[in-house]
Image (spheres, helix red, strand yellow):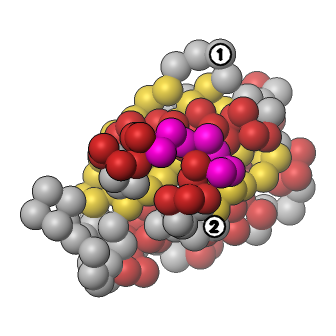
Amino acid sequence: MAPDDRELEALARNVGDWLMSRGLTLATAESCTGGWIGKAITDVAGSSAWFLGGIVTYADDAKVALLAVPAALLARDGAVSESVVRAMAEGAITATGAHCSVAVSGVAGPDGGTPDKPVGTVWFAWAAAGSRTRSEARRFPGDRESVRRLSVRHALAGVRET
């Protein structure tokens, strides 16, 4: 079952409390979620204390221009790939100066899926400045909205493991 807005806001509040307790800031780099992670975060009053901003890069050219994702990675691996989502997460830190970031790129559907990247395939990456970048892929069931909502929830939940 896909989370509702109240659940996403509660999760974002929990992430914010976690970040604040550590003196950390967060940035987002979003593709298939189209800014929804940032929306869930900014639904929390006072989130400006820990959320520096988000960069929505739906098109490949925007990933290159705004997040410094190497065009060669996009050409070789495609936008929905581990290499690209890791570059997005690292680019968000560079662009904003945040301590950590979360990035997401996927195939929300209903079209666009391929045999090796079917609809519901979403790559995530969480980066920490001067440290490691962690990434993973998930495959979510349901329609476009469900895939996107589940992606927002997973992206936020992963921040606490950064």
Q: Position of residue 75 (x, y in %)?
A: 36, 49
Q: Please identify the residue farthest to the top as the structure is shown.
A: 130
Within-10-Å neighbours for mark 2: few <14, some 14–19, many 20+: some
- Taking depth in this image into account, of 153 and 104 the one nearest to the observer is 104
Q: Please, what is the three-letter code of the amino acid marked with disc 1?
A: Gly
In the rendered image, which quarter contains the N terminus?
A: bottom left
What residue is disc 2 on? 35
Is 152 inside the magenta-drawn segment? no
Q: Quadrant of the C terminus?
A: top right
Q: Is residue 70 magenta?
A: yes
Say the numbered circle drawn on residue 104.
none
Residue 3 placement, left or right of 22: left
Instruction: Report the residue marked by disc 1.
Output: 130
Q: Nearer the viewer, residue 29 or 3?
A: 29
Q: Which residue: 54% across, 42% down?
A: 69
Q: Secondary structure at mark 1?
A: loop
The residue at 47%/45% (across/down) is 71
Span of residues in magenta = 65-71
Q: Quick one: 53 or 80, which is closer to the camera?
A: 80
The residue located at (41%, 65%) in the rendering is: 150
The image position of residue 108, as x and y in percent, is 36, 72
User: What residue type is disc 2 on?
Assistant: Gly
Residue 52 x, y percent position in the rendering? 82, 46
Whether residue 134 can be seen here: yes
| 122, 15: nearer the viewer | 122
Residue drawn at (17%, 67%) of the image? 114
